[in-house]
Image (cartoon, rainbow, N blue to C red):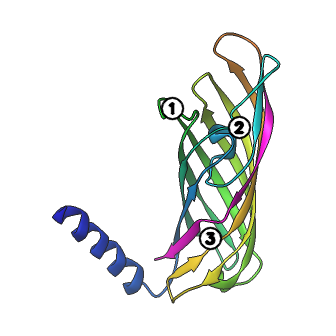
Amino acid sequence: MKKVLVTIALLGFGFSAQADHNYEIQINGGTTGMAGLGAQGGTAGTVTINDDKVGDNTPWSLGAEVYKSMGENLQVGGLLSLADTDTTGSDTTFALGVVARYNFDADHRNSMFAGGGLTFNDIGTGDFIGLHLQFGKRYALSDTITYTPNVTYTTAVSGEFDGGGDIEGSSIVINLLSFSGFM
């Protein structure tokens, strides 16, 4: 427990000590319809495997995105998301991806943004590559912490079910439990 508190304190110091804000860490949490497709915390989503719709009962998810500023408005980075694919809590899925984001304002702490990228998704019954699109708005809570609600759309580009057949489908996720920290 002491190590956890020290880590949180050092992370908080890191967010407050950096004045240039070149890095952003965004955390999304909540429930999501299709963990592999949604790759974020939010609502709704369905994937079709061999004509069966699955993935609309995910009880939780947690996602993290890390960005580095590459100019006044552009950020590039990656994302990692973990989620449960069923209500029993026995199957955990993940999504890992590369993303880029355009900020409509040079002050990223209060900016609307749009971004996209590619994700590798393991949904427990198959793997697929997904196209990830995101749109949102940040609201500054302090000099380094923002509330970051966003909408994420993910669609399967290619992939197969482990038992055979193509994975198809898309997910729209509304991330209301989302915060960013700038370092």
User: Depth-wise, is mark 2 or mark 3 nearer the camera?
Assistant: 2
- Residue occupying the far top of the picture: 163
Amino acid found under the numbered disc labelled 3: Met
* Residue at image coords 37%, 85%: 17
Q: Three-letter amino acid code at disc 2?
A: Asp
Report the magenta residues as a range.
Answer: 168-183
The residue tagged with tag 1: helix, strand or loop?
loop
Q: Is the residue under label 1 in contact with that under label 2 (CB below 8 Å)?
A: no
Mark 2 vs mark 1, CA separation in Å? 13 Å
Q: Nearer the viewer, residue 44 or 162?
A: 44
Q: Residues within 10 Å of mark 2 (few under 14, many from 20)?
A: some
Q: Residue flagged by tag 1: what amino acid is it?
A: Thr
Q: Secondary structure at mark 2?
A: loop
Q: Which mark is residue 56?
A: 2
Relative to 171, does residue 30 appear above or below in the rendering? below
Marks 2 and 3, how far apart in space?
A: 37 Å
Please report the residue visible at 63 percent of the width from the left and 47 percent of the height from the top. 39
Count neighbours of disc 1 (C-alpha within 10 A) and say few if under 14, some if 14 to 19, many if 20 or more: few
Q: Is residue 169 above or below residue 104?
A: above
Give the residue pinned by disc 3: 70
In this rendering, the count of numbered labels is 3
> Where is residue 79 drawn, in percent x and y?
57, 52
Mark sitting earlier along the chain (2/1): 2
Which residue appears farthest toward the left when viewing the image?
A: 2
Do labels 1 and 3 touch, CB within 8 Å?
no
Residue 125, above or below 120: above
Left or right, 132 with reference to 18: right
Provide residue 103's location: percent of width, then percent of height.
Answer: 72, 74
Image vertical order of residue 3 relative to residue 91, above or below? below
The overriding secondary structure of the stretch rendered in magenta is strand
Residue 88 is marked as 1
Q: Earlier in the sequence, mark 1 or mark 3?
A: 3
